[in-house]
Amino acid sequence: MFTIGEFATLGRLSVRMLRHYDSLGLLVPARATSGYRYYAAAQLAELNRITALKELGFSLAQVKTILHDEVSTDELRGMLRLRRAELDARIAEDHARLNAVEVRLRLLESEGTMSTDAVVLKEVDAVRVAALTTTVSAFDSSVIGPTIQPLYQQLCERLEAAGVQPGQGISYYDGTGEEGQPIRLGAAFEVSVGPDPSYGFEIVDLPKIPTAATLIHHGSFETVDDSYQVLAAWIADHGYRPLTHSREVTLEFPADKDKWITEIQMAVTST
């Protein structure tokens, strides 16, 4: 048997909290005499369950009910894993929101200072690619980034399994961006093979773009909105209108994402 102080030390919580648990009937001492409380070593496992359930977000009243229902160790382990997954997802969402806020702040700070001198108008050749496609709701980096990155991971695995050698990476988009209208998004690599039913990806022939406003973006895709702002300003200033499709061609992609070099290709027409 352990005194309440010893048990508190072993359980890494306060004596006051143990007394509170006792008053609730949540963790009653194994023996109590003349105002002294004593706990059995086996009660540490029960205390661990209480702590685990509290960390899942349950109230003490709910914890008491769950314990009285005799939740098994496997069930409790499953509940903890579910809670961990929920917390991981929340952290990822918060991180994405933080990145989006930082991008918007950077855009606001750079308004009126970005140069459009680097924009080049040119014809873009047709290209054959291996691709995985999906749809997104908006031309928004906070939406596109988390969607396209897993596609590229899957595509690399499938290309390797098929024994197909990839060339340059090309992200392509097709859609108006109007509310309620989905945007087709493709994660692709340039290839020189024809279609094959055994492939776990599409073979797509991207058409020639007769007139494209292009700009070289330096850095990760987390900062690509800056370059799109430059491109948009150039298009507006030079009397062009964007068409419904654009591409991003990765020219260099070292391990350091801040050193990536990508060419943005926006199909345009004169007004």
Image (cartoon, helix red, strand yellow):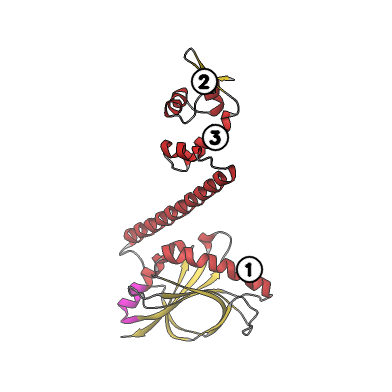
Q: Is residue 192 magenta?
A: no
Question: Which residue in the structure is indicated by mark 3?
Answer: 48
Question: Which residue in the structure is indicated by mark 2?
Answer: 4
Rendering quarter of residue 73: top right
Q: Is residue 240 magenta?
A: yes
Is there any visible trace of residue 266 in the rendered image?
Answer: no
Q: Tell me whether circle 2 and circle 1 mark residues in contact (CB < 8 Å).
A: no
- Which label's residue is closer to the chain start, 3 or 1? 3
In which quadrant of the rendered image does the C terminus lie? bottom left
Q: Nearer the viewer, mark 2 or mark 1?
A: 2
Q: Tell me whether circle 3 and circle 1 mark residues in contact (CB < 8 Å).
A: no
- 3D distance between C-alphas at marks 3 and 1: 42 Å
Q: How many marks?
A: 3
- Viewer-side residue, 35 vs 188: 35
Side of 13 where 167 appears, left or right: right
Residue drawn where x is 32% and y is 60% of the image:
108
Extreme residue toward the top, this view: 34
- Viewer-side residue, 165 vs 58: 58
- Viewer-side residue, 84 vs 156: 84
- Which label's residue is closer to the chain start, 2 or 1? 2
Q: Which residues are magenta?
A: 232-241
Q: How many other residues sit within 10 Å of disc 2, few (<14), some (14-19) or many (≥20)?
A: some
Q: Residue 226 location in percent, x, y?
A: 39, 65
Rendering quarter of residue 71: top right
Residue type at numbered disc 1: Glu
Residue drawn where x is 47% and y is 23% of the image:
15
Residue type at numbered disc 2: Ile
Question: Which residue in the structure is indicated by mark 1?
Answer: 157
